[in-house]
Amino acid sequence: MPYVGIDVAKNKHDVTALNVRGKLFLNHSLFQIIKLVLNY
């Protein structure tokens, strides 16, 4: 099960996702691509 942390702010949002071993698998650049695809 992945662990996801989301920091929501007025002007900037950050997200981090880790697998069960603590390895990062969702980085900031991937999050930017997701935002572009969703037109957010």
Image (cartoon, rainbow, N blue to C red):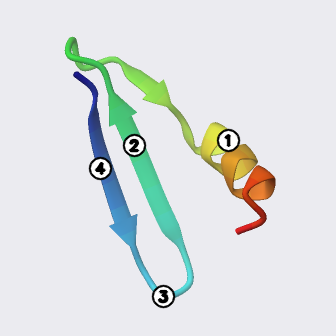
Tell me the CA gap for discs 1 and 4: 16 Å
Which sits earlier in the primary sequence, circle 2 or circle 4? 4
Tell me the CA gap for discs 3 and 1: 20 Å
Task: Kindly identify the residue that appears in the image at 30 percent across and 42 percent down.
Answer: 4
Farthest residue, direction top = 21
Task: Kindly identify the residue that appears in the image at 54 percent across and 36 percent down.
Answer: 27
Question: On the rendered image, what quadrant is the N terminus found in?
Answer: top left
Mark on residue 5?
Answer: 4
Find disc 1 in the rendering and name its residue. Answer: 29
Residue 27 vs residue 4, the one in the foreground: 4
- The reply to whether the C-beta atoms of the residues labelled 2 and 4 are less than 8 Å apart is yes
User: Within the image, what quadrant is residue 8 found in?
Assistant: bottom left
Which sits earlier in the primary sequence, circle 1 or circle 4? 4
Q: Secondary structure at mark 3?
A: loop
Which sits earlier in the primary sequence, circle 3 or circle 1? 3
Residue 31 drawn above or below residue 1: below
Q: In screen coordinates, is 28 left or right of 8?
A: right
Find disc 2 in the rendering and name its residue. Answer: 16
What's the residue type where badge 1 is placed? Answer: Ser
Which sits earlier in the primary sequence, circle 3 or circle 4? 4
Q: Residues within 10 Å of mark 3 (few under 14, many from 20)?
A: few
Task: Kindly identify the residue that appears in the image at 33 percent across and 17 percent down.
Answer: 23
Q: Secondary structure at mark 1?
A: helix
Find disc 3 in the rendering and name its residue. Answer: 10
Task: Kindly identify the residue that appears in the image at 69 percent across and 57 percent down.
Answer: 35
